[in-house]
């Protein structure tokens, strides 16, 4: 092929185009057995090729709590869905940083939830749907009055050969026919490239994305692509080879296939603890949207936690852009108190003990200046004041910090750790553990003991 020089408005450079990616239809599936041998830990290959970091001008978050999030737990009630949707709207702020959320449309309950959320009239998060790759499902989307829907399009040979029992060409032709059906009725297709981190990127993914881009140009409808790291195999390290490279996948989709950033979305799972860093990496390398769920609840090990990406956004952009992070605490409390979901206590940002210290030396630092041992002003940003547990390691510093926090003592009302009235309480705590106690002392228990053995102190701290 003759080499062609073309000025790219995306990179503002002359680019040499020497290869056009076309579908590579193969007789045998490429299962990348050198990486995924199944009876060994997955291997991380490096080819030491580096692609440019290219963050989009605008980035945002999308939500899959009511789709992927419901695949991992008992279904939410309609009331719960409506309440959580309201909280997503409140958290996302007036700029709609939480841009979209997706729903199932199959059951009566699914449809009722969509109708009630639509009736709220919120612009953000926009309500979209998720359907199977069958033409009759588009009528559900149309009937609900939704403008966009996700469509499953498996792209690895694991799925094409083993699940669908097709060749690559057959799979591509079927997917394209379904997408054309969506375009015919004016629905924006969001094509979910399932299992992209085990797919032949240049032999199937890029050629398929190029065909999608052609359809988009012909129809005038912006076909979106969701790159789905279905098994959590994505890796963010520089120089990692495809198909595991998150930078390589995003770069390849916008550079080789010509998909603009605003039509690219990353959807990752947490099987190898990489969901958050992979989502942030997708943003940095040219993907506008990252798809998440509340608390990370999702298939197997879960999805990228939406609340984590709120803070990742602020870290990368230097602003919350109108998002209200205190709503994260409201969401956590709603899950625990109303839905009955037990959040592991050490979970960052939402767990009961995420800003909770048990070590006496840490408590002493907190007493001097809480910034020493707290990640940020959790009371201001999350409405979660830093807390300490009282146990055998707390010492007078931990006990003093607990009293000041528990009774919300400020300024001149704060108790000093040298106050002699603390000694009887400290002696009682020491006696508890000397006698064999191995649990922390609860707030209500300690307050009751305080009222009994140090009544003067108890009255002072309760005085309003």
Image: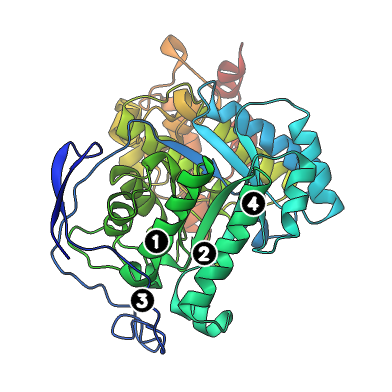
What residue is shown at x 64% (from left), y 63% (from top)?
133
Tag 4–tag 2 contact (CB < 8 Å): no
Which of pointers 3 and 4 lies earlier in the amino acid sequence? Answer: 3
Which of pointers 3 and 1 lies earlier in the amino acid sequence? Answer: 3
Q: Residues within 10 Å of mark 4 (few under 14, many from 20)?
A: many
Front residue of 198 and 435: 198
Q: Position of residue 424 (x, y in %)?
A: 49, 35
Tag 3–tag 4 contact (CB < 8 Å): no
Q: Is 166 rendered above or below residue 327?
A: below
Residue bearing the label numbered 1: 273
Q: Is residue 287 left or right of residue 66?
A: left
From the image, state whether disc 3 or disc 1 is nearer to you. 3
- In what element is the residue under mark 3? loop
Q: Is residue 425 left or right of residue 82?
A: left
Which of pointers 4 and 2 lies earlier in the amino acid sequence? Answer: 4
- Measured in 3D between alpha carbons, the distance from the residue under mark 1 to the one under mark 2, in whole angstroms, is 9 Å
- In what element is the residue under mark 4? helix
Which of pointers 1 and 4 lies earlier in the amino acid sequence? Answer: 4
Front residue of 346 and 123: 123
Which of pointers 1 and 2 lies earlier in the amino acid sequence? Answer: 1
Residue bearing the label numbered 2: 301
Image quadrant for the C terminus?
A: top right
- Measured in 3D between alpha carbons, the distance from the residue under mark 4 to the one under mark 2, in whole angstroms, is 32 Å
Tag 1–tag 4 contact (CB < 8 Å): no
Can residue 272 be seen here? Answer: no
Q: Residues within 10 Å of mark 3 (few under 14, many from 20)?
A: few
Q: Position of residue 324 (x, y in %)?
A: 52, 25
Residue bearing the label numbered 4: 182
Corner quadrant of residue 454: top right
- Measured in 3D between alpha carbons, the distance from the residue under mark 2 to the one under mark 3, in whole angstroms, is 33 Å
Q: Residues within 10 Å of mark 1 (few under 14, many from 20)?
A: some
- In what element is the residue under mark 2? loop
């Amino acid at each position: 092929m003759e080499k062609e020089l073309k000025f790219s408005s995306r990179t503002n450079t002359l680019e040499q185009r020497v290869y056009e990616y076309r579908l590579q239809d193969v007789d045998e599936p490429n299962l990348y057995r050198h990486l995924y041998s199944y009876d060994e830990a997955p291997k991380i290959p490096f080819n030491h090729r580096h692609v440019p970091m290219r963050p989009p001008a605008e980035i945002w978050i999308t939500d899959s709590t009511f789709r992927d999030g419901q695949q991992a737990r008992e279904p939410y009630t309609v009331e719960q869905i409506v309440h959580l949707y309201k909280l997503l709207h409140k958290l996302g702020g007036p700029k709609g940083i939480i841009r979209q959320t997706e729903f199932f449309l199959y059951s009566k309950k699914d449809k009722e939830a969509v109708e009630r959320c639509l009736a709220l009239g919120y612009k953000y998060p926009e309500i979209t749907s998720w359907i199977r790759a069958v033409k009759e499902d588009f009528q559900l989307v149309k009937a609900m009055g939704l403008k966009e829907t996700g469509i499953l399009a498996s792209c690895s040979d694991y799925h094409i050969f083993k699940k669908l029992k097709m060749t690559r060409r057959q799979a591509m032709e079927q997917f394209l026919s379904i997408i054309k059906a969506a375009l015919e009725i004016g629905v924006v297709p969001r094509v979910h490239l399932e299992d992209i981190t085990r797919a032949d990127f240049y032999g199937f993914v890029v050629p398929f994305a190029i065909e999608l881009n052609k359809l988009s140009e012909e129809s005038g409808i912006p076909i979106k692509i969701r790159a789905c790291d279905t098994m959590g195999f994505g890796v963010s390290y520089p120089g990692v080879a495809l198909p595991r490279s998150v930078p390589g996948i995003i770069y390849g989709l916008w550079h080789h296939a010509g998909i603009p950033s605003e039509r690219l979305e990353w959807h990752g799972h947490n099987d190898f603890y990489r969901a958050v860093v992979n989502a942030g990496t997708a943003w940095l390398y040219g993907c506008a949207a990252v798809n998440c769920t509340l608390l990370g609840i999702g298939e197997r090990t879960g999805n990228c936690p939406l609340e984590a990406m709120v803070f990742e956004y602020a870290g990368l952009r230097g602003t919350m852009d109108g998002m209200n992070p205190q709503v994260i605490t409201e969401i956590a409390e709603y899950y625990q108190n109303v839905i009955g979901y037990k959040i592991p206590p050490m979970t960052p940002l939402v767990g009961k003990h995420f800003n909770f210290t048990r070590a006496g030396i840490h408590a002493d630092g907190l007493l001097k200046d809480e910034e020493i041992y707290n990640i940020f002003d959790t009371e201001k940003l999350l409405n979660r004041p830093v807390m300490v547990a009282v146990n055998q390691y707390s010492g007078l510093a931990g006990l003093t910090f607990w009293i000041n926090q528990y009774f919300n003592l400020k300024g001149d009302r704060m108790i000093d750790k040298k106050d002699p009235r603390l000694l009887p309480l400290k002696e009682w705590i020491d006696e508890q553990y000397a006698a064999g106690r191995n649990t922390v002392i609860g707030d209500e228990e300690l307050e009751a003991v305080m009222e009994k053995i140090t009544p003067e102190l108890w009255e002072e701290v309760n005085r309003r």
